[in-house]
Amino acid sequence: MRKLGHQKHYYVMLLPGMVWLALFNIVPMFGILMAFQNFNPGAGLFKSEWVGLDNFTYMFQLNDSKTVIINTFIIAIGKIAFNLLVPLVFAILLNELRGMRYKKLVQTVVYLPHFLSWVIMATIVIGIFGYYGVINTIIGMFGGDPKLFMADAGIFRQLLIGTDVWKEFGFNAIIYLAALTGVNLNLYEAAAIDGANRWHMIRHVTLPALSTTVVLLGVLSLGNVLNAGFDQVYNLYNPLVYSTGDILDTWVYRLGLQNLQFSLATAAGLFKSVISFVLIFISYRLAYRYADYTVF
């Protein structure tokens, strides 16, 4: 009790955050009841008709649900893979630079996109790939016809993955750069004495030193397999690319807030949350087993 008395001011400081967490994260969880009801806003949450798993059955019978689940998996896995590979390559190349001023300049430039919201980034992307954008302007200069990049379902997934990597690879490289600072410089000296060139040092010293970090980040990324990025997709997609660009989050948004199908939208959201929870649990178990990483 004496210890609690000495620390009570810390609990007072913590109280606003706990109230915020309860009001906006815990209390709304009671809304998952709508997934098992034919929810009627007039009747309210506790008086609406109970339908059990009918909403989930209906959801999986819809062709749209299969499309958005496939799109979500493909886009999310593509982002995970390239957001592991590209920052790794960039960090290794940046680590090989010897000019510190130029190195810091490059770091600053590539970090900047991470701090911009997708509202701003989407405007930039549309300015580049839009009908009157930079790419079509260059195509027109060489006598070509402008292309509707933003309305082409065949390349929209690649566009989402590429722009996400462009936005995040500089910031994601920080973890690899931090790991590289822990590499023993004597290993490079020993390799140089043995006649190793830069490529040999990267292959036999740098990459093995980063292997644990790569495995850890890859395993922890499993929890994001169903998180394809609502902010990005919502600001870039349109009905012409729904077949390849519509994901679970944007589908739930349209079902619930535009079409007012509250129960079906809640069922889809709950499905995503349960799968994500299972994947996060598996990822932490794998991280503990292969990288000796624990949260608690």
Image (spheres, rainbow, N blue to C red):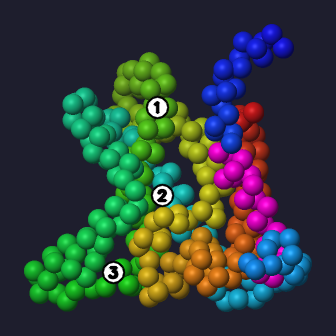
Magenta part of the chain = 20-40
Residue 277 occupies which quadrant of the picture?
A: bottom right
Between circles 3 and 1, the one closer to the viewer is 3
Q: Dot 2: within a 10 Å radius of its alpha carbon, few (fewer than 14), some, or many (20 or more) residues? A: some
Give SS at disc 1. Answer: helix
Q: What is the C-alpha distance between the residues marked 1 and 2?
A: 19 Å
- Magenta stretch, main secondary structure, is helix
Q: Position of residue 6 (x, y in %)?
A: 72, 12
Quarter of the picture holding the N terminus: top right
Residue at the (22%, 86%) spot, across then down: 146
Q: Amino acid at mark 1?
A: Ala
Dot 1 corresponds to which residue? 178
Q: What is the C-alpha distance between the residues marked 2 and 3?
A: 21 Å
Task: Name the foreground residue: 21 vs 61.
Answer: 21
Q: What is the C-alpha distance between the residues marked 3 and 1?
A: 37 Å
Q: Residue furthest top?
A: 2
Cβ–Cβ under 8 Å for marks 2 and 3: no
Does 228 appear above or below 187?
below
Nearest to N terminus: mark 1 or mark 2: 2
Residue 73 occupies which quadrant of the picture?
A: bottom right
Cβ–Cβ under 8 Å for marks 1 and 2: no
Give SS at disc 3. Answer: helix
Residue 290, can we see it? Answer: no
Q: Dot 1: within a 10 Å radius of its alpha carbon, few (fewer than 14), some, or many (20 or more) residues? A: few
Dot 2 corresponds to which residue? 82
Task: Name the foreground residue: 218 vs 128.
Answer: 128
Dot 3 corresponds to which residue? 149
